[in-house]
Image (tube, helix red, strand yellow):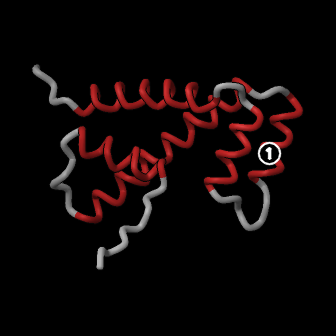
């Protein structure tokens, strides 16, 4: 019987893949966890900046209301909101994340000084 592998959140998958691509695979577990948190925070900020740039005043108000809900909305609910309110959101997010990945990977390279 095949074992079931838990499905990783797309953002977590992006963050883990990016960290591995940068060569940070041998970090101690605590350092790895801290790096995941920091990179995830940066990805969320970039997504937020994209949303602020793309949403009109009504959309920003609706986003604020969504994000202030208790309990906090799931990442799926936030993604659905962005997809419903931002034309071509997946493509725009992909470009934003590609730019972030490029800058992250460039910063992770050892300097040749």
Say above or below: 1 vs 27.
below
Q: Quadrant of residue 32?
A: bottom left
- Viewer-nearest residue: 74 or 1: 1
Name the outermost residue toward the right: 58
Image quadrant containing the N terminus: bottom left
Q: Secondary structure at mark 1?
A: helix
Q: Residue at x 78, y 43 (%)?
A: 63
Q: Residue at x 36, y 68 (%)?
A: 5
Say above or below: 8 vs 101.
below
Q: Is residue 81 left or right of residue 47?
A: right
Q: Residue at x 40, y 44 (%)?
A: 14
Q: Residue at x 74, y 52 (%)?
A: 67
**x%, y% of residue 89?**
63, 30
- Viewer-nearest residue: 57 or 34: 57
Image quadrant containing the C terminus: top left
- Viewer-nearest residue: 112 or 101: 101
Q: Is residue 92 left or right of residue 70?
A: left
The residue where tag 1 is placed is: 64
**x%, y% of residue 99?**
43, 24
Q: Is residue 54 left or right of residue 76?
A: right
Say above or below: 16 vs 113.
below
**x%, y% of residue 28?**
20, 62
Dot 1, crowdedness within 10 Å: few (<14), some or many (≥20)?
few
């Amino acid at each position: 019987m095949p074992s079931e592998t838990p499905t990783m959140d797309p953002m977590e998958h992006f963050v883990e893949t990016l960290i591995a691509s940068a060569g940070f695979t041998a970090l101690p577990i605590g350092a790895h966890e801290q790096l995941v948190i920091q990179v995830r925070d940066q990805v969320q900020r970039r997504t937020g900046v994209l949303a602020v740039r793309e949403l009109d005043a009504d959309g920003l108000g609706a986003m604020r209301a969504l994000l202030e809900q208790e309990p906090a909305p799931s990442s799926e609910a936030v993604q659905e909101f962005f997809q419903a309110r931002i034309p071509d959101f997946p493509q725009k997010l992909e470009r934003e994340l590609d730019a972030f990945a490029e800058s992250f990977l460039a910063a992770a390279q050892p300097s040749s000084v």
